[in-house]
Amino acid sequence: MANQENRKSREGVVYSTATNFEYKYDAEQEGAETLTPQKQNLKVLLDKKQRGGKKVTLVEGFVGSEDDLKELGRQLKTKCGVGGTVKDGEILIQGDFRDKILDLLMKSGYKAKKAGG
């Protein structure tokens, strides 16, 4: 499973004819160290593209491990009382909860701001 996830993150590499080619992953992706909340620059925005007109609140810009991102996503979903998911380094919360999520992040010590219209 981990190998399959690594394949997906090889952006820009399509094919190599070298017999000894081995893709080198960014050190940032491997064992990324989670920054403290004060050093995080999170963006909270509303998105409804390619979602059948349904609105979701996105939290972007988290720097850290996947487990810490999932934990933050779980906390936000619980506080808002809605569903959501964590994928591609983003937290998706179902519905328009920009103000509430921004308030929750600020109270937790994160540097967060609204982005988009």
Image (cartoon, rainbow, N blue to C red):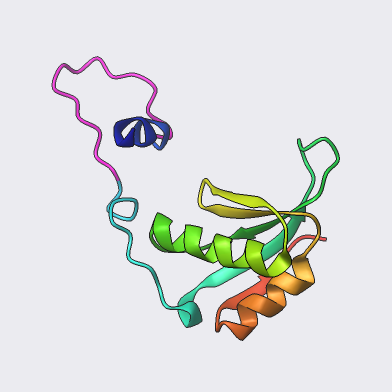
Answer whether residue 24 is magenta in the image: yes
Q: Does residue 56 appear in this view?
A: yes
The residue at 55%/84% (across/down) is 109
Q: Position of residue 90 (x, y in %)?
A: 57, 53
Left or right of 3: which side holds 39? right
Q: How many marks?
A: 0
Q: Does residue 114 appear in this view?
A: no
Viewport quadrant of the C terminus = bottom right
Q: Main secondary structure of the magenta part?
A: loop
Report the front residue among 109 and 25: 109
Q: Position of residue 86 (x, y in %)?
A: 55, 51
Report the front residue among 3 and 45: 3
Q: Using the image, determine if residue 76 lies above or below residue 47.
A: below
The residue furthest left is 20
The residue at 20%/30% (across/down) is 22
Answer whether residue 55 is magenta in the image: no
Q: Position of residue 14 (x, y in %)?
A: 39, 22
Q: Position of residue 91 (x, y in %)?
A: 59, 55
Left or right of 30: which side holds 76? right
Q: Using the image, determine if residue 18 lies above or below residue 5.
A: above
Would you identify the image quadrant in which residue 97 lies?
bottom right
The residue furthest right is 53
Would you identify the image quadrant in which residue 25 lies?
top left
Span shown in magenta: 10-25
Viewport quadrant of the N terminus = top left
Left or right of 6: which side holds 84? right
Q: Using the image, determine if residue 4 lies above or below residue 90.
A: above
The residue at 40%/37% (across/down) is 9
